[in-house]
Image (cartoon, helix red, strand yellow):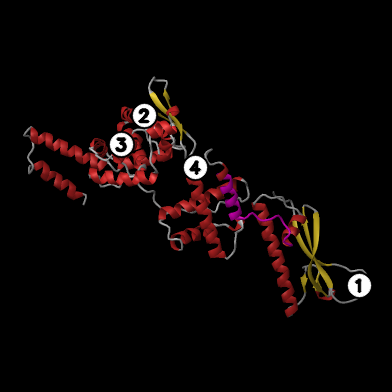
Amino acid sequence: MKTKNFNLLFYLKKVKGYESGDLPIYLRISVDGKRSEATIGRGIEPEKWDEKRGKARGNTEDARSLNAHLDSILAKLKRIHTRLLDSEEEISADTLRNELDGKGKKSKMLLEIFSDHNKQMESLIGRGFGANTHKTFKSSLKHAREFVEWKFKRPDYELRKVDFNFIKDYDFFLRTEKNCIPISADKYVKHLKKIILLCLANRWIVVNPFLHYKSTAKPSPRTFLTKHELDVIRNKALSIERLNLVRDIFIFSCYTGLAYIDVQKLTPNEIAQGDDGKLWVFTKRHKTDTPSHIPLLKEALEIIENYKDHPVCVRRSLLLPVLTNQRMNSYLKEIGDLCGITKTLTFHMARHTFATTITLSNGVPMETVSKMLGHNSIKTTQHYAKVLDSKTSEDMQKLEERLYDKATTTGNFEATGPEQIEMGRVVSMFR
C-alpha cells in the first residue's frame, strides 16, 4: 500500500513548569498527514539541540553518541516502512510506531507455516494426498527444523528473512551435515519451495527467494524392461509357487501400468465394461486420487482369470492376492536371477515398462499414456519419452545387425568388404 507522505522528526518536548536541564526527545511519525509520537528515552538541554536538523549540536562525544542513536532509529524505521510497502501491508503512523516498539503484528514464522501445511496434508490423506507423501513432508520439516537450529541457533525463523542464501545454505546442510544424496537433497529443497510458493500465494511475502536458485540434481533414469526381457520373465518355468504368484502380479502391472499400492487395493468392482464393450480398469491412484482408466489387454485378463478363485481374493474381495511390497521386491530379485536379468527387478519397474515398452514404444500417443497412468501433468509422462531416446543406439544396432544378416544371406555382403572398411572410416571421423 503506497503512502502519499512519510516524514520523521525528532524534537524536544516542552514540559510544564520547566526551568532548566534536559528536555525529553520525542519522535514524530507522520503518514498521510496523520501523526503518532513517542519518546526515545533520551534527553538533552535545549541550548545543545539543533531544532532545524533535529540533532544534537557540536562534535562532543555525548553529541556524537546521541546523534548515532537517532540515526539508528531513523534507519530502522525506514527499513520497517520499506518492508511494509514490499509486503503491501497497511501503513499508518501508529503501525510504524508499534513496529518500532516491538508491538507490531506477529511475524510469520517459516517452520510454523510448514507444520500447519503438514497437518492439513495429513487430514487429506486419501483425498488428494498419499500417506507416503505426507511422510516425506514430515521428514522435510524435520530437516528444515534441524537446519534452522544448526545455522541460527533458534527454534524457528522469520519468513520475511528467508532469502537466496538461506536456500543455498539449506541445500549445503542437507548434502554435508545430513549426508543426503543429490536427488534426496533436491526433493527436500523442492518441499521447502512448495511452502514458499504457498506463502507467496497468501501474500505473506512478495519476493520469491527461489527466483535465482537452480537445482543441480539430475532426475534419476526410469529403469524398464525391454520386450525381450519381459518375454523371458513371462515364459520362464518357475517351480516355486510364491515366485509364480509374484511373477504373475508383476506381469499384470507391466500390462496395466498400475503402481503397487493400486494393484494391492484393486477390487473386482473396479473392473467394468467400457464404451467399446471391452473390460477396463476404472480406479483412482492412491498417490494423487486422480482417475486412472485402463483398457485390459489379453495378458492382464488371463492373470485376473487365473486368480479369481484364490482364497485371499475371495476372502478379502480383492482382484489379486498381492503380498507386501517388501516381499514382492525380494522375490522379484530371485526371479531376475533365475531369468538372467542383469537389472535389479523392483515392482515399480513394471509401471515404467508399461509406459515405455508396452505403450510409447508401440505408438500409443503420450496424452493417452498420461491419462492411463493417472498423471496430473503430461510433463511427468514426457520423462519416459526421454528414456526411450536412450534406446535409439540399441535399436539402430539391431537394425544394422538385421541388414548385415540379410546381406550375408543373399551373398551380397562380405564381412571384410569395402562397406565395412568405409563404415570404419566414418566412425573414426567422430572419435
Tell us which disc is closer to us: 1 or 3: 3
At label 2, counting other C-alpha atoms closer than 10 Å, the crowd grade (few under 14, some 14-19, many 20 or more) is few
Looking at the picture, which amino acid does disc 3 mark?
Answer: Thr
Q: Secondary structure at mark 4?
A: loop
Residue ID for mark 4: 130
Where is residue 289? Give x, y as percent.
49, 36
| Residue 309, numbered label | 2
Where is residue 21? Give x, y as percent.
86, 77
At label 4, counting other C-alpha atoms closer than 10 Å, the crowd grade (few under 14, some 14-19, many 20 or more) is some
Asked if residue 359 lies left or right of residue 231, the reply is right
At label 1, counting other C-alpha atoms closer than 10 Å, the crowd grade (few under 14, some 14-19, many 20 or more) is few
Q: Marks 2 and 1, how far apart in space?
A: 102 Å
Q: Secondary structure at mark 3?
A: helix
Tell us which disc is closer to us: 4 or 2: 2
Taking 47 as reference, is 286 above or below it?
Answer: above
| Residue 18, numbered label | 1
Asked if residue 171 lies left or right of residue 336, the reply is right
* Contact between labelled residues 2 and 4, with CB atoms less than 8 Å apart: no
Q: Earlier in the sequence, mark 1 or mark 4?
A: 1
What's the magenta region? 101-121
